[in-house]
Amino acid sequence: MGLMSGLNGMAVGQTMLLLLLSNVFMTFAWYGHLRNLAAAPWYWAALVSWMIALAEYLLQVPANRLGYREAGLSVAQLKVIQEVITLSVFVPFSFWFMKEPLKLDYLWAGLCLVGAVYFMFRA
């Protein structure tokens, strides 16, 4: 049996897409203000970030419900998927948007997440 046997593949794909989109919003909510609102007072940055985070929650909550109820994913599996997506979104964001250098540590972190995925989804 494969790593995802017994799961609803279409719902897993929809869950992952929603989590990907939600993570893009959350990454900008958490870190985008460091570049775009650097000179603004912290409370203004917090308010703008909160408004962006609302969009994240409007995607993340249905994603987790769909993943849990329809796809048959466990909470732990949902969390590991989210962490993989987080790194997949964060690395390009930090490179292209924040203009930070790519680091080999991203590769090592990614390999650790591959191990986490294996252990979370093995039969």
Image: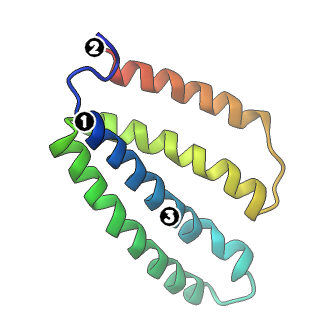
N-term mark: 2 or 1? 1
- Colour logic: rainbow
Q: Position of residue 30 (x, y in %)?
A: 56, 67
User: Can you say whether 38 is above or below 85 in the image?
Assistant: below
Pointer 2 and pointer 1: residues touching (CB < 8 Å)?
no
Which residue is drawn at the image coordinates 23% and 34% (left, top)?
A: 8
Residue 92 coordinates in the image, percent (x, y): 69, 51
30 relative position to 20: left or right? right
- Mark 2 lies on a secondary structure that is loop
Mark 2 — residue? 123
Query: Which amino acid, by three-letter code, is at mark 3?
Result: Met
Residue 26, numbered circle? 3
Of 47 and 43, nearer the camera is 47
Amino acid type at circle 2 is: Ala
Q: Amino acid at mark 1?
A: Leu
Q: Which residue extends farthest front? A: 10
Would you say the residues marked 3 and 2 are in contact, meaning their CB atoms lie under 8 Å apart?
A: no
Residue drawn at (34%, 18%), measured in percent from left and top? 3
Q: Secondary structure at mark 3?
A: helix
Residue under circle 1?
73
Q: Are marks 3 and 1 in contact (CB under 8 Å)?
A: no
Q: Using the rendered view, name the quadrant where residue 77 is placed.
A: top left
